[in-house]
Image (cartoon, rainbow, N blue to C red):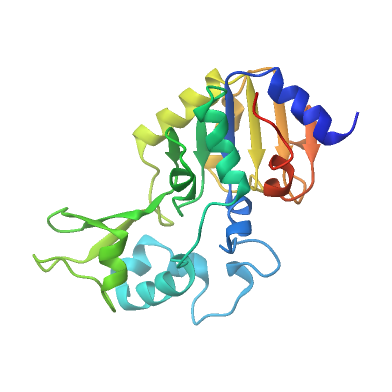
């Protein structure tokens, strides 16, 4: 039995699928990942991306932060790709509990997924650090330089920066989904970003599937590992 046929069989036999996704899911939408050969960590800036995307850097050099954030994090015109759409279809047809994602691009929601645990936040939500007024992504895009609230406070994206903790409610949402799944599909992630990657240990279901371009630390435990682009793989699957 080939890989796609085996994956189809696993999906057919599962009714509580959870997708655990990373940056590799969105590369097919034109959003660069961080750790590939041409990812952000391998590009040259005045400061390393890890430093720029830290709480301390945001607080001390907001202008530099927003220059990088608008240039490299906010990708204009990105649309959900076949992987996002297929995951949403699984949920819509009652086969999927939801998506746990490390991505901040909002593409799972844009594709129609309803139950999405965004572990690292989303670019679509922003708040004033002073009065906590909410601002959408359009508000950030419409401003140049450092975006300021009407009260004078700096507007900060609701994304989890280095040195910041994950949102507790989102953690509980993710763990609840993973612990109740009968099939966990880990895709587009190298499983090296913690604590997010540690949540997969709560899975006690029947099938563990890896769909990734490179190998991960969980491959030896997987019932099936496919090394290919997730959009290409899932587009060959029927939801039934």
Q: Answer yes or no: is residue 11 visible.
A: yes
Quarter of the view holding residue 26: bottom right
Quarter of the view holding residue 115: top left
Q: Position of residue 150 (x, y in %)?
A: 10, 66
The residue located at (58%, 64%) in the rendering is 30
Q: Using residue 129 as the reference point, say whether residue 157 is left or right of it.
A: right
Q: Which quadrant of the rendered structure holds the C terminus?
A: top right
Residue lying furthest bottom: 46
Q: Nearer the viewer, residue 225 or 98?
A: 98
Q: Position of residue 156 (x, y in %)?
A: 28, 61
Residue lying furthest left: 151
Q: Which quadrant of the rendered structure holds the N terminus?
A: top right
Q: Position of residue 118 (x, y in %)?
A: 44, 42
Q: Nearer the viewer, residue 42 or 33?
A: 33
The residue located at (60%, 39%) in the rendering is 86
Quarter of the view holding residue 197: top right
Marker count (numbered): 0
Residue 169 lies, with reference to residue 39, above or below; the image says above
The residue located at (82%, 30%) in the rendering is 5
Q: Answer yes or no: is residue 207 visible.
A: no
Residue 25 lies, with reference to residue 140, above or below; the image says above
Q: Nearer the viewer, residue 49 or 17?
A: 17
Q: Position of residue 162 (x, y in %)?
A: 44, 57
């Amino acid at each position: 039995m080939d890989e796609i046929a085996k994956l189809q069989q696993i999906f057919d036999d599962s009714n509580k699928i959870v997708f655990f996704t990373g940056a590799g899911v969105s590369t097919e939408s034109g959003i660069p990942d961080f750790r590939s050969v041409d990812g952000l960590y391998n590009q040259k800036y005045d400061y390393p991306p890890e430093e720029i995307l830290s709480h301390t850097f945001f607080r001390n050099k907001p202008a530099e932060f927003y220059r990088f954030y608008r240039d490299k994090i906010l990708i204009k015109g990105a649309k959900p790709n076949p992987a996002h759409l297929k995951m949403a279809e699984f949920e819509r047809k009652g086969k999927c509990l939801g998506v746990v994602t490390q991505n901040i691009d909002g593409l799972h929601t844009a594709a129609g997924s309803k139950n999405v645990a965004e572990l690292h936040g989303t670019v679509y939500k922003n708040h004033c650090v002073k009065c906590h007024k909410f601002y959408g992504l359009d508000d950030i895009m419409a401003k140049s330089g450092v975006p300021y609230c009407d009260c004078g406070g700096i507007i900060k994206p609701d994304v989890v920066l280095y040195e910041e903790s994950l949102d507790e409610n989102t953690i509980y949402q993710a763990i609840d989904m993973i612990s109740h799944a009968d099939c966990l599909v880990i895709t587009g992630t190298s499983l090296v970003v913690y604590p997010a990657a540690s949540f997969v240990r709560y899975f006690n279901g029947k099938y563990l599937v890896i769909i990734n371009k490179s190998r991960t630390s969980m491959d030896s435990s997987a019932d099936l590992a496919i090394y290919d682009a997730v959009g290409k793989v899932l587009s060959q699957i029927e939801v039934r």
